[in-house]
Image (tube, rainbow, N blue to C red):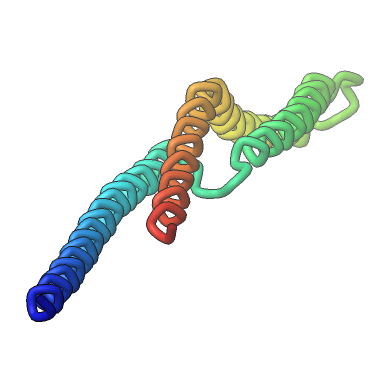
């Protein structure tokens, strides 16, 4: 029965074609679902990465860390302030000694000696004011440097978290392309 054999063959081919077509559709659907999963993962990681980067920017702004190496800059500025304070202290001591020695020998007219003492007193007041301004800046800078270990710990946390998120993005991109 030749017709039955042809029909059986045609049915078998049709069944094989439909099975292949169904398997292909299932693979395509599975691929779409996998791609959608990776796209969603990527979006989630990108959103978290943006949140971390914004948090880092806010933290830098709040802690006056707008420039890289600001700790080194602050330490350098502190050193310069210390040098300036020492110079002012020397000038103050010299002016005090000079004022104390005005007319020590008694040969200077009273009015001239009084003017010299007034001038030196004004100079001392000016130097003392300058010294106080520098001392205030130095104290503020010292306090900011003292808080630095906590600040550096937080910066390290931000950097570590951002690096982890970037690694996750790389992993997602690699797996998606496989």
The residue under the point 24% across, 51% down is 37
Query: Is the residue 104 above or below the residue 45 in the image?
Result: above
Q: Is residue 52 visible?
A: yes
Q: Residue at x 50, y 48 (%)?
A: 66
**Where's residue 167, x and y in %?**
48, 45
Q: Is residue 1 left or right of residue 148?
A: left
For the C terminus, the image quarter is bottom left
Q: Which residue is rendered at x = 55% and y = 21% of the image?
A: 146
Identity of the residue drawn at 32% across and 53% down: 42
Where in the figure is residue 68, as x and y percent of width and height? 59, 46
- Front residue (pair 7, 68): 7
Image x and y of residue 172, in percent: 39, 51
Q: Is residue 114 visible?
A: no
Q: Position of 16 compared to 85: left or right?
A: left
User: Quadrant location of residue 3?
Assistant: bottom left
Q: Quadrant of the N terminus?
A: bottom left
Foreground: 125 or 163?
163
Quarter of the figure with residue 61: top left
The image shows residue 91 at horizontal and vertical percentages of 78, 31
């Amino acid at each position: 029965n030749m017709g039955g054999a042809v029909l059986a063959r045609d049915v078998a081919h049709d069944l094989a074609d439909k099975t292949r077509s169904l398997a292909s559709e299932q693979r395509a659907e599975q691929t779409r679902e996998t791609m959608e999963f990776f796209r969603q993962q990527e979006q989630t990681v990108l959103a978290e990465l943006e949140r971390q980067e914004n948090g880092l920017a806010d933290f830098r702004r709040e802690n006056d860390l707008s420039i890289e190496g600001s700790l080194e800059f602050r330490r350098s500025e502190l050193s310069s302030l210390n040098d300036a304070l020492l110079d002012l202290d020397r000038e103050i001591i010299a002016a005090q000694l000079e004022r104390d020695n005005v007319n020590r020998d008694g040969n200077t007219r009273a009015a001239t000696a009084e003017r010299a003492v007034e001038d030196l007193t004004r100079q001392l007041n000016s130097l003392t004011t300058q010294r106080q301004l520098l001392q205030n800046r130095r104290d503020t800078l010292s306090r900011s440097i003292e808080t630095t270990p906590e600040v550096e710990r937080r910066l390290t946390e931000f950097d570590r978290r951002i690096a982890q998120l970037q690694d996750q993005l790389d992993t997602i991109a690699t797996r998606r392309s496989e």
